Amino acid sequence: MFVSILPRALAVRTSGSPTYHTKDVMITMWKTLSDLHPSLGSYEVIGKTVLNNDIWMFKIGNPNGARLMFDGSLHGTEDTGTEAEYLYAKWLLESGDAKANELVQKTYSFFIPVVNDQYDRKNGRDSSHPYPDGSTVNTNGIDLNRNFAYGWGSGFGSTDPVAWDYQGPFAASEPETQALRSVMQTYRPKIYVNFHVGGGHYGHYMGNVTLGQMIITKYNAFVQSNGVVNPLEVSGSASSSGSGTATSDAYFFGALAWVSETSDWTVLPDSYNEWVSNWYPQIRFLLQAMSESVAGTSSPPPPPPPPLGQIIVNAGGPYNAKPNSMIAFLGSVAGGNAPYSWAWSFGDGTSSQLQNPSKSYSVEGVYSASLTVTDSSGHTNSSITTASISSSIIPPLPPIQNYQTFLVASAVGTVSVLYYFSRRKRTRR
Ligand SMILES: [Zn+2]
């Protein structure tokens, strides 16, 4: 029938706010925007979803600039992050605003607008979509924002496979989670933003408190000078981010990690136009404040291209888990010629020939795991990482400057900024 010949991109959305763009349309819009500015924009596939669709990452700005990373639709019905990032990228590239032009020269922004290709909170993993080792989970999907590795399994996510917040069978079990972890680890963004529901005026962060407060100060200045009435509410503490979340992993990899969402997750913006007029300006000011706050600062250099005829191997990690809990090891390689052969040695006498093997350790300790990769031309190289096995629920926090748990209340003009010790019940993420 007629409808069946429509490309998927034009299909009616099956869930979420129907006036928002479909995920396919958004990706097409992103590619078009990038293609119009080839000297400032590029994009690449960073992985596949459970349903084998590409996960795209768009890179905008100066490759030597300070790096920021933004995800979208980690929960598949929460598309405002996807929309906000696009409008922000368009502002950066096409507004002609002097500040936008400056930020494009001083920052390098990474946008992953569609992490979850489902129009569902969860990612579509079910018994007909097995893991690489053939095992299955009888579920209706996994909550990707409970599946990240840092602190996974400490109670923030559910162990019930049919629950809305099911954490998955082991840490970073899902390809979407692995793709995000991989780019976080490779590019080490200074700021990571994890968007939820409205992407509105409620948020929190973990990481560098000084930098976080600088961003809030800039945001408040924008609000006052532009007459936006909704204040930004911020809360934060190490534990409030939630273990197993995108922010917990971004924090682990050294980012100032933010969650952005509406103050009440039950109130969805009614329509795209309403969201653009009422909510997007605030998000834009917040993203601009983030970019301004790191612009011109130095970032660790991007991974160098491998010398001709050589390959560079990355064993990922460091990994942390409880005894007998599965770890998703991430192997990657740059240079050389496919196909590659993979040889893991896990430090406990076991090994694997998979690129991304999963395994557990039964005895506590710190293990040295190595990955050796050989390409089709015989080039070979190795990488070593560690797996720390401890029965304590959350591994020790990585040393990050300026981190502290805090409680502050302050007021800037008419805008109140509140910080809380504990995660609010309304925060669903
Ligand atoms: Zn969410």
Image (cartoon, grey):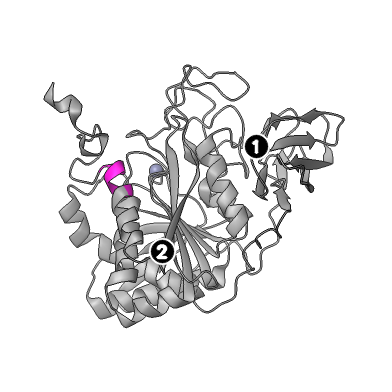
Left or right: 385 as drawn, with respect to 257: right
- The quarter in which the C terminus is drawn is top left
Give the residue displayed 41% in from the left and 32% down from the top.
Answer: 122
Viewer-side residue, 137 vs 403: 137
Q: Quadrant of residue 369?
A: top right
The amino acid sitting under disc 1 is: Pro
Q: Is residue 213 visible?
A: yes
Give the residue displayed 69% in from the left and 47% down from the top.
Answer: 316
Viewer-side residue, 45 vs 208: 45
Question: Measured from the top left, where is residue 153 in percent x and y?
Answer: 61, 35
Please identify, in this view, whether the residue under mark 2 or under mark 1 is nearer the observer.
1
Residue to which mark 1 is pinned = 339
Q: In what element is the residue under mark 2? A: strand
Left or right: 358 as drawn, with respect to 182: right
Question: Measured from the top left, where is residue 37 in percent x and y?
Answer: 35, 66
Q: Count residues near mark 2 (Cα–Cα under 10 Å), then give few for <14, some for 14-19, many for 20+.
A: many
Query: Mark 1 CB in 8 Å range of ligand 1?
Result: no
| Marks 2/1: CA–CA distance | 29 Å
Q: Count residues near mark 1 (Cα–Cα under 10 Å), then give few for <14, some for 14-19, many for 20+.
A: few
Span shown in magenta: 22-27
Q: Quadrant of residue 234?
A: bottom left
- The quarter in which the N terminus is drawn is top left
Residue to which mark 2 is pinned = 41
Give the residue displayed 50% in from the left and 52% down from the top.
Answer: 422
46, above or below 165, in the image:
below
The amino acid sitting under disc 2 is: Gly
Left or right: 242 as drawn, with respect to 367: left
